[in-house]
Image (tube, rainbow, N blue to C red):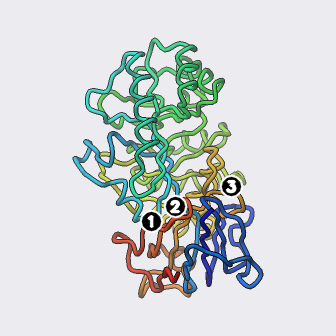
Amino acid sequence: MSKLVIRNIGLILSGDLAKPILDGDCIVCEGDRIVAIGNGNELDTDGAREIVDAHGTTVAPGLIDSHVHPVAGDWTPRQSQMNWIESTQHGGVTTMISAGEVHTPGRPKDVVGVKALAIAAQRCFENFRPNGMKIIAGAPVIEQGMEEQDFKDLADAGIKTLGEVGLGTVKAGEEAGRMVAWARKYGIQSTIHTGGPSIPGSGLIDKDVVLAADADIIGHINGGHTALPDDQITCLCEQCHRGIELVHNGNERAALLAMRTANELGQLERVILGTDGPAGSGVQPLGILRMVALLSSLGDVPAETAFCFATGNTARMRDLDCGLIEVGKAADFVILDQAQHSPGANILESVQQGNLPGVGMTIIDGVVRLGRSRNTPPATKLPEVVA
């Protein structure tokens, strides 16, 4: 297998809340897996196909966007925009998860059509990976009339996630809960829309519906776009043990409330991040980085902790093999540094003051995919492919 060595690393962010910063200055990958982490003079770095000199920059797991709405290829009819996925990669994202292909023009709502669209989307994005981006798609929006066999059929076809519960005709808590249970029985994970309506046809999903549905992820608990009242948000954090998803296309004050509540409960492992784009707010290539900076700077959590929300937390919640710098995990990385002329003694201090870092390189499956980002502010130091 091909071998990649990243050496002269200044800081390794693990993505793991239990130990967000790792010792060492070198990572060795074979094929698409991480095989060693530590000090370069103690690791087997011989025979590398490619060597990246990090020049003292920071290596983090590739960021994960837990909530996107793809449609067809790298195009979105929501904004009539091309290359939004590739542009998001310039923001350090290497994996994105569909919360439903709801913007598909003429989206079918009959049971046969719902299943057909999901399976087609799953197959398309399994085969189509712009610049290596991993897109977990094929997320059916549940509709009235679906029965248990339909969820078995979807699972047998390779479907792993449901689209946002509540964006279709199923809006009542008891009905949603029954279908979510069927999905869970067959290994399909679920997300529920939370808050006010986002698109025509969607509706208010309040805390009572969320609790009754018992989906695996409380989708955009800070609203997509309109958040629930504060007491309902804190109630969901306290009474539900499911994932707490915070999105860029939501209410930022509500996102901070939810994160602070999770922190007070000692349950930061439940916090995951998404953008909920493309949406009426547009496409936000830097949406995940902006959420990391927001939560760290105004939520008073260390920057290395906030990076875990966008990496290891999401990977564990979503049962992914990426998001952690750990032996055996996918060799997906983003190499960052403090933005030029930003305040703070280092990248972590700069982010905790609310500044975005500069992305210098993105690596997916052990392959260098992008150099300096065209979207982030320029990094002070840049990594370099030296062999």
Q: Is residue 24 visible?
A: yes
Q: Is residue 235 above or below residue 358?
A: above
Q: Residue at x 64, y 62 (%)?
A: 15
Under mark 3, the amino acid is Glu
- 1 and 2 marks in contact (CB < 8 Å): yes
The amino acid at mark 1 is Arg
**Residue 96 pos. (x, y %):** 47, 49
Dot 1: within a 10 Å radius of its alpha carbon, few (fewer than 14), some, or many (20 or more) residues? some
Circle 1 SS class: strand
Residue 182: percent from left, percent from top: 61, 20
For the residues marked 1 and 3, what is the alpha-carbon distance in whole angstroms? 39 Å
Crowding near the residue tagged with mark 3, few <14, some 14–19, many ≥20 C-alpha atoms within 10 Å: few
When the figure is inspected, residue 127 is found, relative to residue 386, above or below; the finding is above
Residue sitting at x 50%, y 53%: 95
Work out how far the residue at label 1 is from the one at label 2, CA to CA, in angstroms.
7 Å
Residue in front for this viewpoint, 149 or 206: 149
The span from disc 3 to disc 2 (Cα, nearest Å) is 35 Å
Q: Which mark is residue 364?
A: 2
Q: Residue at x 62, y 70 (%)?
A: 302
Of discs 1 and 3, which sits in the foreground? 1
Mark 3, mark 2: which one is toward the viewer?
Answer: 2
Name the residue carrying label 1. Answer: 369
Residue type at mark 2? Ile
Q: Are marks 3 and 2 in contact (CB under 8 Å)?
A: no
Instruction: Give the residue number, with chain letter if any, for mark 3.
Output: 264
Identify the secondary structure beneath mark 2: strand
Residue drawn at x 46%, y 23% is 142
